[in-house]
């Protein structure tokens, strides 16, 4: 019997899940829309459904590791702040999921988890110091300094998406103005493209009539 672990990435747009063997080899992956518009219970149901769908009869699932976009309480049990998944803020995620799944559940900020993954098995294997950047609904960062994850005094060191890059700039989902992710996240880039496409559409209609 093989031992397996499940890795989950909760983003503002998609929840991605994958099944790995004990050597870290990918066995299977799935994804489902996060659907934050449907509220906390719907997001949690999607999350539990994707994890359960990754179960196997071929071996034993040892634990579930979850990366989530946002700032976690230092005890890593509750998501404190998540501008793009506000529905999960203050939810006792670790307790809810471990009870629903009857498995040990570990939570980490998504970019921190990805940085640790790159350090273990990816582009950071030979490096003691690097910054991993996630680019999706928002922008996140995970620092590896002197070989260890560095989260700073308040656990927010990697939250580079909310660095202000334009004073009094565009309103960000976090409530501040001018954050990096309000300009450079995939969502922001897509929105600008939509504006250009709409302008092009108007221009051609105007020209035609
Ligand atoms: Zn922000």
Image (cartoon, helix red, strand yellow):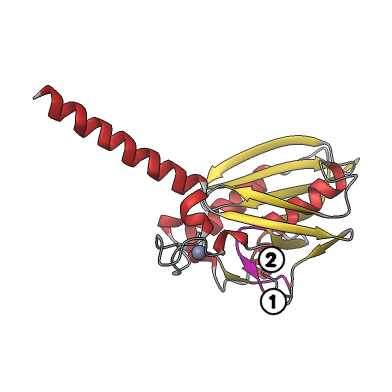
Q: Nearer the viewer, residue 166 or 144?
A: 166
Is residue 1 placed above or below 80 in the rendered structure?
A: above
**Which residue is pictured at 16% across the width and 28% down the height?**
205
Q: Counting residues from the N terminus, which is met first, the one under dot 1 or under dot 2?
A: 2
**Which residue is pictured at 47% across the width and 61% down the height?**
166
Q: Quadrant of residue 30?
A: top right
User: Residue 100 in the image: x percent, y percent?
Assistant: 65, 61
Q: Nearer the viewer, residue 153 or 17?
A: 153
- Say few, some or many: other residues with alpha carbon within 10 Å of mark 2 (under 14 / 14 to 19 / 20 or more): few
Ligand 1 neighbours mark 2 (CB distance < 8 Å)? no
User: Residue 1 in the image: x percent, y percent?
Assistant: 91, 40
Q: Secondary structure at mark 2?
A: helix
Residue 7 shown in magenta? no
**Which residue is pictured at 73% across the width and 77% down the height?**
153
**Side of 60 where 105 appears, left or right:** left
Q: Which mark is residue 26?
A: none
User: Residue 59 in the image: x percent, y percent?
Assistant: 84, 42
Is residue 180 placed above or below 3 in the rendered structure?
A: below
Comparing marks 1 and 2, which lies closer to the viewer? 1
Q: Secondary structure at mark 1?
A: loop
**Which residue is pictured at 71% across the width and 64% down the height?**
98
Residue furthest front as drawn: 167
Q: Would residue 34 be visible to someone looking at this image?
A: no
Residue identifier under label 2: 99
Q: Nearer the viewer, residue 100 or 28?
A: 28
Q: Which mark is residue 154?
A: 1
Q: Quadrant of the C terminus?
A: top left
> Which stretch is magenta?
67-78
Secondary structure character of the magenta stretch overall:
loop
Q: Nearer the viewer, residue 116 or 146?
A: 146
* Cα–Cα gap, marks 1 and 2: 28 Å
Residue 74 shown in magenta? yes
């Amino acid at each position: 019997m093989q031992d397996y672990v499940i890795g989950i990435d909760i983003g503002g747009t998609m929840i991605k899940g994958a099944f790995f063997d004990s050597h870290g080899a990918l066995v299977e992956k799935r994804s489902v829309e996060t659907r934050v518009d449907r509220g906390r219970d719907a997001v949690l149901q999607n999350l539990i459904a994707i994890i359960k769908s990754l179960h196997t009869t071929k071996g034993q699932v040892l634990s579930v590791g979850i990366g989530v976009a946002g700032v976690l309480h230092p005890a890593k049990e509750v998501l404190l702040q998540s501008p793009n998944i506000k529905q999960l803020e203050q939810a006792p995620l670790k307790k809810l999921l471990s009870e629903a799944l009857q498995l040990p559940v570990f939570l980490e900020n998504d970019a921190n988890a990805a940085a640790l993954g790159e350090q273990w098995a990816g582009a950071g294997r030979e490096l003691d110091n690097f910054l991993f950047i996630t680019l999706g609904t928002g922008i996140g960062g995970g620092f590896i300094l002197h070989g260890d994850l560095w989260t700073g005094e308040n656990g927010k060191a990697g939250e580079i998406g909310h660095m202000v890059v334009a004073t009094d700039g565009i309103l960000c989902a976090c409530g501040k103005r001018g954050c990096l992710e309000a300009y450079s996240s995939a969502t922001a880039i897509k929105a600008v493209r939509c504006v250009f496409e709409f302008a092009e559409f108007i221009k051609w209609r105007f020209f035609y009539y």
